[in-house]
Image (cartoon, helix red, strand yellow):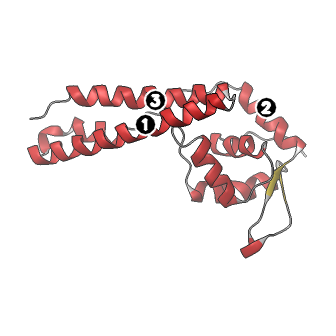
Amino acid sequence: MPDFQINPTAAALLGLLHEGAMTGGQLMAAAERRLGPYWSMTRSQVYRELPVLAEMGYVRLGKPGPRSSQPYAITASGKRAFSRWLAESPGRDALRNPVALRVAFGQQHSGDQLQELYTSANQYHAEAMGMAKEQAKEAKKNGDQYGAAALEFAVAYHKAALTWLKAVPTE
């Protein structure tokens, strides 16, 4: 079977499957736990990609479990595709910040709307930064230096967002 290009979501799933066979729900939980602070995946993306990866021969389906859960395992060609993906250029960041977009239209906001936006964003980033710090600490404790480094990115991102929020116009 020929090898095909994979998108970042498919690559993330293949990377997670290096840990062992998982169902879609288990993959969602693993993605949230390991990647959530800096990479988002939706349930619909996961369940859309898994059959495609199976059709490409990159994963194989295991024996159905309880409630018709279907485990997936990475294949040798899936490991090769993941290795090729790792070697590709990652491309440019796709920066899409919903708070910054709303701030760009700040003149159309009421003062109360802006204050609520900033309060909510501050709370979110403070909580997310704290969680990412804890996860990075845990990854370091477990000897996962690469996972910890990726989580430190999330810490730095939230710290930068909090710094930016202190400087945004309020009127």
Amino acid carrying mark 2 in the image: Ser
Nearer the observer: mark 2 or 3; the answer is 3
**Residue on which the image places disc 2:** 83
Side of 95 where 99 appears, left or right:
left
Q: Residue at x 74, y 25 (%)?
A: 87
Q: Determine the residue positioned at 83% across, 38% down.
A: 79
Q: Residue extending furthest front?
A: 141
Residue under circle 1? 130
Q: Are marks 1 and 3 in contact (CB under 8 Å)?
A: no
Residue ranking furthest to the bottom: 67
Expressed as whole percent of the image width and height from the top left, the position of residue 22 reads 75, 55
Query: Could you say where residue 23 lies in the image, as x and y percent from the top left?
Result: 73, 59
Which residue is located at x 79 percent, y 31 percent?
A: 83
**Of pointers 2 and 3, the one earlier in the residue sequence:** 2
| Pointer 1 or 3: first along the chain | 1
Q: Are marks 2 and 3 in contact (CB under 8 Å)?
A: no
Name the amino acid type tagged 1: Gly
Q: Secondary structure at mark 3?
A: helix
Is residue 98 rendered to the left or right of residue 79? left
The residue located at (17%, 39%) in the rendering is 106
Residue underneath mark 3: 155
Q: Quadrant of residue 127?
A: top left
Compared to residue 114, the image places residue 146 above or below, namely above
Label 2 sits on a secondary structure element that is: helix
Q: Is residue 73 visible?
A: yes
**Amino acid found under the numbered disc labelled 3:** Val
Q: Which of pointers 1 and 2 lies earlier in the amino acid sequence?
A: 2
The percent position of residue 76, horizontal first and vertical second, equals 89, 42
- Please tell me whether mark 1 sits on a helix, a strand or a loop: helix
